[in-house]
Amino acid sequence: MCGIIGYVGNRPAVPILLQALRDLEYRGYDSAGIAVLDGDGVSIAKKQGKLVNLESALSNVPAGTVGIGHTRWATHGRPSDENAHPHASCDGRTMVIHNGIVENYASLKEELSARGHAFRSETDTEILAHLLEERIREGADLFRALRETARRLEGSQAIVAMSLDEPDVLAAARLGNAGGVVVGFGNGETVVASDLAAVLPITQEVAFLADGQVARVTSGGIEVATVDGDPVRLERKRIPIDPVTALKGQFPHFMLKEIHEQPEALADTIWSLATLDPAALYFDDLGSAAARLAQVERVVLIGMGTSLHAAMLGQRYIEAFARVPAFADNASEFRYRDPVLDGRTLVISVSQSGETVDVLEAMAVARAAGALQITVCNTEGAQTTRVAEGTVYTRAGLERGVASTKCFTAAVVALYLLALRLAMAKGRVTEAELAGHLSDLAHLPGAVATIIARRDALRGRAIQLARAEHVLFLGRGLAYPVAMEGALKLKEVSYIHAEGYAAGEMKHGPIALIEPAFPTVAIATQHALRSKMVSNIEQIQARGGPVTAIVTEGDDELAALCDAAIAVPPVSPWLEPVVAVIPLQLLAYDVAVHRGCDVDQPRNLAKTVTVE
Ligand code: F6R
């Protein structure tokens, strides 16, 4: 949460900072601000609301070539001009931007106030500017001042600071898991940002700070040390860039564009991990985890939100194919409940960003217990990939819409293949069976493309659902996580209250809600539990509840039973979740557009959740 950018180089900083903030705005959009060193002074501009407010408020654009910028998702202090970052020290010479929470904020504020510091905002971030000011006044350079300040902070933080006392230097720190800090090395210019989206338009040569590291950033590169001052050498990487995925193109919203990208994202993910002829799996990034898979006796899958729903499907694939007990858990619960883990437990974390704080903290718990870890991640070099022994990259390309779509389906197929990989290691799947599974997968991108091409036919349904105040999503078996995901998509982009339930749970309470104004969406494709779903649909209809069903093409009997039916092409039952979720994504999108909601930047949300 919060987007951070710092630039030190040879070009005017303002246009670069603003472009980076546009690329980072999905991380938070309560307010935005920039500070640029300009001659002997500093120009600071901050505005509540979306970035566009800041852009229209910028009258005099300073020509300085060193600056920092921030787009905020509020934690301490409401969204306002005063609380927007950057924050300055009392003497106005030191400026900071920040992502995270200073947990000992109250005691530090009391201490600083007692020493005469005056606070101009309600944020915890401002503490950092005052602490840095004190260190610099005592004679520390910015780099040392930030290391010393870092040692006083509790909680997870990503920080970038600059000072008029060293006008050609930025200092950046990563402490814990408040989001990444990536450094980009250009030609006579260096950038530091909270994620790759802001760096890749400038350079593909990058390095990532690890927990507890602080960098001195100049136009010529970086010097890195731990908070205790021990020097660190960072490994540089070249990140491939796909400029097309970063732009909206002909689409009005990133969410719609990313829904349309799914056939390609699925194909890229599948064929980066498998071949059809010969039928084989290639997990090049499993590292030392590969050799230990045969010893795995239990699997725990962790994730949050949409990624948790993918993990729930992964659980079902692993149990079915590898016959290893598997359990999917919410990472924010897992991390606090002292889970039973050992060296024969495989923990699979699912995270599109690879930076979600609860996932990273849960991984720390798993690491301390000696569990083997694999992460399923869409972001090259993200923190989860550095903590886990092995990585399975999804190849969905950059996802910019706050509501995750293509990363969900890409994670589901990656987990499907990982389950098969585990099954091979355990000797539970024959080569002929593997060939069958891969040939089923080969049809999937085409089936998804077919559904997307029928979007116009769904619009009428969306207009009707847009009038509802509440919507229930029901599924059984593999369709249960799909019901959860359908409900999450609808609520986050359209603000309609929606719940995803296991259909069998209906009679244990939720059925009391059913009445004519309470529509249900039932995921009732041809899976083994279809007949049970039919009973649930009939029970809802008997109580006057309208039902829209997701059915398999040709299932006219079920289509006729429901108030409306959305047909999806037949695929292997294991892959039905991937086709069934596509109309739910499209429905959520069209409902939200119909209701005039901000689809790509829903209220209160941010793409990467780096605070608890
Ligand atoms: C919903 C959505 C979120 C994320 C969740 C985890 O559309 O995108 O629920 O899935 O915040 O994020 P990652 O996958 O980055 O760990």
Image (cartoon, helix red, strand yellow):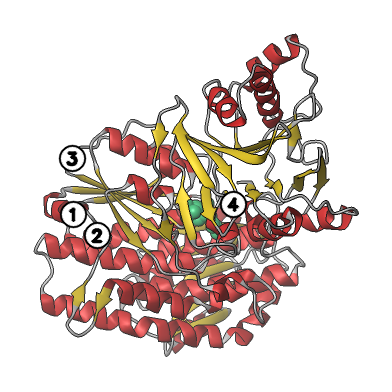
Rendered image quadrant of residue 334: top left
Q: Are marks 2 and 1 in contact (CB under 8 Å)?
A: yes
* Of residues 517 and 108, the one drawn nearer to the viewer in this rendering: 108
Rendered image quadrant of residue 468: bottom right
Q: CA distance from mark 1 to mark 3?
A: 15 Å
Residue 538 appears anywhere in the view: no
Using the image, tell me which numbered label, if any, was put on residue 324. 1
Q: Are marks 3 and 2 in contact (CB under 8 Å)?
A: no
Q: Secondary structure at mark 2?
A: helix
Residue drawn at the location 74% of the way across and 48% of the way down:
30
* Of residues 75 and 459, the one drawn nearer to the viewer in this rendering: 75
Does residue 276 appear left or right of residue 561 in this picture?
left
Using the image, tell me which numbered label, if any, was put on residue 343. 3
Q: Looking at the figure, which quarter contains the C terminus? A: top right
Residue drawn at the location 18% of the way across and 40% of the way down:
343
Q: Residues within 10 Å of mark 3 (few under 14, many from 20)?
A: some
- Please name the residue that numbered disc 4 is placed on: 191
Q: CA distance from mark 2 to mark 4?
A: 42 Å
Q: Percent from the top left, x then y, of residue 305? A: 49, 53
Q: Nearer the viewer, mark 2 or mark 4?
A: 4
